[in-house]
Each structure stands twice: as C-alpha cells, then as structure tokens.
Image: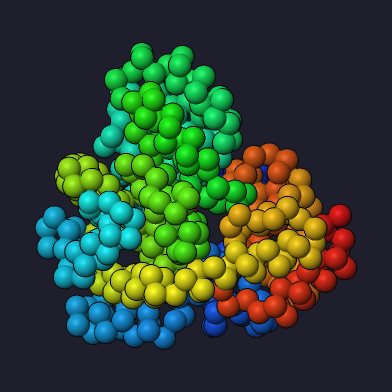
Amino acid sequence: MSSLTEFATRKLAGLEDRGLRRRLYETDRFSDTHVRRAGRELISFCCNDYLNLSHHPQVIAAANAATERYGTGSGGSRLISGNTPLLAELENRLARFKGTEAAMVFGSGYLANIGIIPCLAGPGDLILMDELNHACMHGGAQLSRAAVRPYNHVDMRHLEELLKQLRTGHEHCLIITDGVFSMDGNIAPIERLTALASQYDAWLMTDDAHGLGVLAEGRGSGIVGGHHADIPLQMGTLSKAIGAYGGYLCASRPVIDLIRNRARSFVYSTGLPPAMAAASIKALELIEQDKALCARPVENASRFCTALNLRAPETPIVPLILGEADRVMTASAALEDRGYLVTGIRPPTVPDGTARLRFTFTASHTHGEIDGLVSTIRDLDLAA
Ligand SMILES: *Cc1c(COP(=O)(O)O)cnc(C)c1O
C-alpha cells in the first residue's frame, strides 16, 4: 500500500471508530417531496428546496429555454467572456428585492463567502462572528488573515464585550452572522446587531441562505418589523428556496464593484450557467407574487412542533437534538425504514454532543404527510 493510500485508510478508520464516517447515497428526487433511494420511495423531510421551486414547471421551462438559447455552460469567468445576458437581470432583481443599490452573483453560496470576506478584512482588521455560523463563513474568515473572534451564539452581551475590548485596536471590523442558523432554525437578533455595528463602526454581514423565500413574505431575515434593516452586506444562496444553484451578495454599488474586482472566487471562477440564472429569475418572480406560498413552510413546521409539544418554530428548520452521533444515525435509519428521509447531522457540522435529526419543512408537504411523520416519531419514542 502506498503511503498516501495508507494515510487515507487510517484516517477513514478513525472516522468510522467515532461514528463520523460519511457516505453518499444516490437520491432521486422525483417530485416536490418524494425521493427514491435504493429502489425505495421515501418522503423527504431534509431538503432545503423550501418552496419546491426546483420542480416548478415554470422554473424548469425557464431553465430549459435558457439552455437552448445560450448553451449549458457560460464558457469563462465573467470578467473574460462568461458574463451571459441573464446575469444582469438576475442581479437587478436581487438588489430590488433586498432593497440595496446593487447585487452580484457567485458560483455558489460557499464561493460567495470565501470570496467576499477576504476582500473586506485583512491583517490588522477584526472579524467577530457567531460561533454557530455556517462553515463557509469560518472558511472566508480564515482566508482573510484578520483577527477572528467567535462570540457565544446570539449572545449580544458577549459581542459587545468583544467590541469594547478589541475594536479600537483594529482598523476595520466585520460582524458576521447567519440570518437563520442553518442547523438550529433560530433567527439572529438583527436589530441588536445593527445597533452594535453602528455604535462601534463595524460592518454587518448576514448570510440569508435559509431566510430568503420563507421569512417576511419571502424577503428574508433582513426584514425587521416590516422594514429593511440597516445591513450593508447581505449575502445568500440561490440553492435553497430559489431552487437553483449559485450565491449572491447585495450591497452598495461601490462595494459590489470592489468585490467584482477583488474576490478571487469570482474573478478566477466560471460564471453561473445560463439555466441557473433563468431559473433564479423565474423563482424570484414567483416568490414576489405568492406570499401564501412563502408562508407555508413555517406553517408546516408549526403543525409538526405543535403536535410534538416542541417550541414554536421561527423558520422551517426544526432540530431534534439527540446527543451522540450513533443515536442519531440509529434514529435516522429507523425513520427511513418507515418511509421518511431525515438525515442525521453530526460533528463537525454541529458541536460535539449535539448530534441531531434536522427536519426541514417545505410548502408542498401535506398535512397527512406531516401527521404521519409525527406519529412515527411518537412510536419510535424520539421526542421524549
Ligand atoms: C447552504 C449554506 C451556504 C452555502 O450555500 P451553497 O449555495 O450551497 O454553497 C452558505 N451559508 C449557509 C448559512 C448555508 O446554509
């Protein structure tokens, strides 16, 4: 065995020992909420396609038409030859929807975060971020070479302490938070964050991956009390409620122009495929038109939580924390045996000892499907 293969084999055995080895399972998502795995049909409660728009006939038709007209790939970085016609329309629509001057799209949400953050903070600067932020914000922060200090989850007192202690020793300060925490489903205290950012001259950046399309009539976590909160950097993804693929940033015109010039994941990566731009434009149009559709994922999560006596959900994400990884994987397998797909979430995606089932509810889940899931969870004694 070569030393490389030996290295990989040993590392995998270590993951296996700790119940942390991950595997890929082919998942044929053939309708809004149903998938086929290993020949079996399952109802999926772990998909981020909150509005089921990836299967909407009008969205599919728009993607197909764009592929026919412009081809499958964009053929280059947008700064070379890949700036295909639909991208400007998509960016204008995103900016309008988020109430900012300008917007730009990236190849994915992950690429957006690892591109944006190092453009705005570097050596001598300070990044303060919620400890439960998504992995790609940690990745972007590390790439920036700024001083990075996590604050306790949604703990605004801790954040203010760090600002008091550290702000004056650094030139610029970026505060970064998930708008909706992806593994817990709670919403960041946006109002407090905007106030602290303003008081300490820090730049607030939110990641609205799980807010767009499902909160505030679809407009996302940046809306507080019916108005756009003062968030100068609003990042998000086209890969969840929009049902396509790609990432975006909404900000002022100069900030967008700077990031178009400097973000390495934008400059040195191929432009979004035309089909993804077209699908996203159509999806945004549907979101703007149909407020009832946008409300449905949270309504469905509420039905589930009420039935199981869980805390009322703020978003379509409902975690059921079981503790150890093994226990979660056993629970997930038991649900699958009974026809439900609910993936277990383990460290390092979540902190040690907080492995969980993470349920996500979409607009198309029926009351019957939700009630069936509830009684199965009761039978399995999972929500005790
Ligand atoms: C999914 C997710 C991302 C990554 O977006 P992709 O488009 O899937 O790369 C970023 N941030 C958060 C909070 C997410 O949940």
Q: Is residue 321 above or below residue 91?
A: above
Q: How is the image coloured?
A: rainbow
How far across and down, in percent of the image, does residue 357 sit? 70, 57
37 relative to 280 in the view: left or right: right
Closer to the camera in the image, 90 or 349:
90
Q: Is residue 254 above or below residue 332?
A: above
Q: Quadrant of residue 41?
A: bottom right
How far across and down, in percent of the image, does residue 224 sit? 46, 49
Q: Is residue 1 visible?
A: no
98 relative to 88 in the view: left or right: right
User: Which residue is located at x 68 percent, y 63 percent?
Assistant: 302
Q: Is residue 255 visible?
A: yes
Q: Quadrant of residue 136?
A: top left
User: Which residue is located at x 31 percent, y 30 percent?
Assistant: 121
| Tally of numbered tags | 0
User: Which residue is located at x 19 percent, y 82 percent?
Assistant: 69
Closer to the camera in the image, 166 or 47:
166
How far across and down, in percent of the image, does residue 345 sit? 65, 53
Q: Is residue 245 above or below residue 248?
A: below
User: Which residue is located at x 76 percent, y 55 percent?
Assistant: 310
State the residue lying farthest toward the left.
Answer: 80
How far across and down, in percent of the image, does residue 72 sit? 26, 75
Quarter of the figure that contains the C terminus = bottom right
